[in-house]
Amino acid sequence: MGICMTALVDKLAADNTLTDYEMAELLKYRTTETTSYIFQKALETKQKYYGNEIFIRGTIEISNYCRNNCYYCGLQRNNKFITRFRLDENDIMKYCSNGYSKGIRTFVLMGGDDYYFTGDRIAEIISMIKSLYPGCAIELCLGERQSSVYRQWLEAGATRYILWHETASETHFKKVHPPDMSLLKRKQALWELKEMGYQVGSGFMTGTPFQSVADVVEDLKFLKMLDPQIVHITPFLPTEHTRFEKERSGNGDMTLYLMAIVRLMLPHVLLTADPALENVMPDARKKSFGAGVNEVFASLATDEVKGYFNVYNKRYTLKNCSGDDVSRMAAKIEESGNNAAVSKGDYVYPPEKEKLYGPFHRIM
């Protein structure tokens, strides 16, 4: 079985694709031998296109209000047990200044689907950041909006948009989301963002309740079809005061395995390791670099804000994310034998290394 699976890894590395049956086999028969081999191939592929650079993006959690009621998410609108917050423009600019002083050149504005932050309000914030830091890039992760709003933010200076599809299976989507949410609408938004000119990020959770191997195959097929510039895979974490609070967490090893598959399937992608990984595997983000990951998020906000932005239970903890997250992540990257890097200037695509990011700037 090990020989068979390593042959599938070779095929995936050579062709960047497998049949549905082959992908399911690769997922079902994950052995120590196969895992070691696919990590080796994923790392070789990552180094081919990006060398030893691991990019650090600075996240600013601007709001934990959300109009949606996803069954797994701690920010769901029906959760009456969390303290809600919104940052104002002064706070956001303060965190940008803090991040810039530490070498950050990509600011990620992240929040729930909070329509208090209208198209005009976010466009104004984008313009403020671009005026003070013209060489920096702005990435948004603010949920589903109208096409006109996406375009307004793009014209204001945002270049990347992250919108997780969460699960590409219609049947599974309905089991973890309320009836008023639509997978079709989510997928259409991703295609729209890409056609508009954004660098698009998407991804899914591993170990979600009711998730099957066939569902994960659907996730991988959708990512292959979408061909996003950024992929973000995170383990499911049970969260208090949600429908799935008593379910068990997703598996960290499987999450890294899927990251390696994505690296071979989409060789040029920016593959992101989420802080949530640290809750299911010690030092997980550092370990993820050996599975082909080349991007991490570091929060620029205060510990108080990190604590309020509780999408997944314990996502931000004193152990993993308190204090100076940028310096801590840079140190982990350097300890792993990689270079903690940001890019000077904005991005273009397709990803030819120098054209993608411009000259690299070492943080440490």
Image (cartoon, helix red, strand yellow):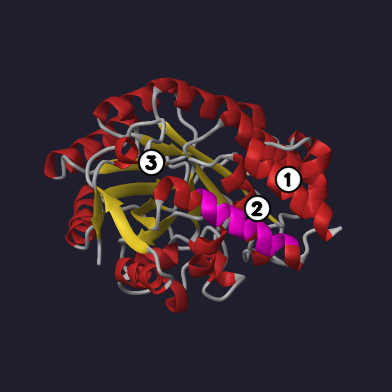
In front of the other: 81 or 189: 189
- Say the numbered circle drawn on residue 216: 1
* Disc 3 to disc 1, C-alpha distance: 26 Å
Q: Quadrant of residue 6?
A: bottom right
Give the residue pinned by disc 2: 258
From this viewpoint, which residue is outermost toward the left?
132
* Disc 2 to disc 1, C-alpha distance: 9 Å
Locate the C terminus by quadrant. bottom left
Q: Give the label, 2 or 1, closer to the camera.
A: 2
Q: Is residue 256 above or below residue 226?
A: below
* Disc 3 to disc 2, C-alpha distance: 24 Å
Percent across and percent down for residue 337 are 40, 69
Residue at 49% x, 46% y is 66
Q: Earlier in the sequence, mark 3 or mark 1?
A: 3
Range of magenta residues = 34-45
Q: Earlier in the sequence, mark 3 or mark 2?
A: 3
Q: Give the label, 3 or 2, closer to the camera.
A: 2
Secondary element at image label 3: strand
Q: Earlier in the sequence, mark 2 or mark 1?
A: 1
Q: Is residue 37 magenta?
A: yes
- Say the numbered circle drawn on residue 140: 3
Q: How would you rate the neighbour count of disc 1 (Cα within 10 Å): few for under 14, some for 14-19, many for 20 or more?
A: many
Percent across and percent down for residue 361 are 23, 54
Residue at 64% x, 44% y is 13
Residue at 65% x, 33% y is 222
**What amino acid type is highlighted by mark number 3?**
Leu
**What amino acid type is highlighted by mark number 1?**
Val
